[in-house]
Image (cartoon, grey):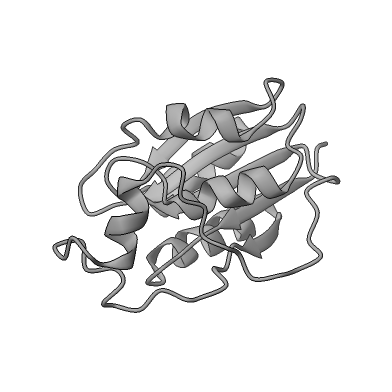
């Protein structure tokens, strides 16, 4: 039996709720990806072209700094990775997280929350941030508790 981790970024708390259900269902460890500077509601105003999230998402090379920690993914085989969908992809802090750790020979199962978007180009945008031996799969967006349970059973 492989050891599982649920890692997530949640700007407003919505993804946190899904991550907790998933972690409880999978009997997995849970880890919150925290930005060094938390996002404010003004930062998340996608209608403002100068808002922090908008500026970051326009620049795919943007790597928001994470708060410091001594976390390691070394002991995990499967990582459920959750985030809100921003502009049809994962927020760039997810790339920061992936580039900070070695995911070689691991499976990353994506789950996301969204106001209406699907994964879009998420996998293609995350792929350069991990080793070629890392498998990234789309789990689901806005999954019900039953859907999260099915995801755990599959992986």
Extreme residue toward the left, this view: 47
Q: Relative to residue 127, is residue 90 depicted above or below?
A: below
Residue 81 position in % (x across, y down): 56, 47
Query: Which residue does the image show at 31% across and 57% down from the upper left?
Result: 55
Pick the front one: 42 or 120: 42
Left/right of residue 57 with respect to residue 4 in the rendered view: left
Please state the horizontal and vertical placement of residue 30, each as a whole percent of the image: 67, 61
Q: Residue at x 35, y 79 (%)?
A: 40
Q: Quadrant of the N terminus?
A: top right
| The C terminus sits in image quarter | top right
Res. 147 image quadrant: top left
- Tag count in the figure? 0
What residue appears at the point 41 percent right and 48 percent down from the top-left corner? 112
Please name whichever residue, 1 or 107, is drawn nearer the observer in this view of the structure. 107
Residue 141 in the image: state x and y as whole percent. Answer: 36, 43
- Is residue 124 found left or right of 21 in the rendered image? left
Residue 26: where, in percent of width, then height? Answer: 65, 50
In the rendered view, tell whether residue 41 sits above or below residue 45.
below
- The answer to whether residue 37 is visible is yes
Q: With 78 as the anchor, is 122 left or right in this view? A: left
Foreground of the two, 153 or 129: 129
x 46%, y 50%: residue: 62
* Viewer can see residue 81: no
């Amino acid at each position: 039996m492989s050891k599982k981790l649920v890692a997530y970024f949640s700007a407003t708390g919505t993804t946190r709720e899904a991550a907790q259900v998933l972690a409880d269902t999978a009997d997995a460890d849970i880890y919150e990806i925290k930005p060094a500077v938390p996002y404010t509601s003004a930062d998340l105003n996608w209608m403002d072209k100068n808002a922090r999230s908008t500026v970051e998402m326009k620049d795919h090379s943007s790597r928001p700094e994470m708060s410091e920690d001594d976390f390691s993914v070394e002991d995990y085989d499967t990582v459920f990775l959750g985030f809100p969908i921003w502009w049809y992809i994962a927020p760039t802090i997810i790339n920061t997280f992936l580039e900070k750790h070695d995911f070689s020979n691991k499976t990353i199962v994506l789950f996301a929350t969204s106001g209406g978007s699907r994964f879009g180009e998420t996998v293609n945008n995350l792929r350069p941030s991990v080793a070629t031996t890392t498998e990234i799969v789309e789990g689901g967006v806005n999954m019900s508790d039953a859907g999260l349970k099915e995801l755990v059973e599959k992986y």
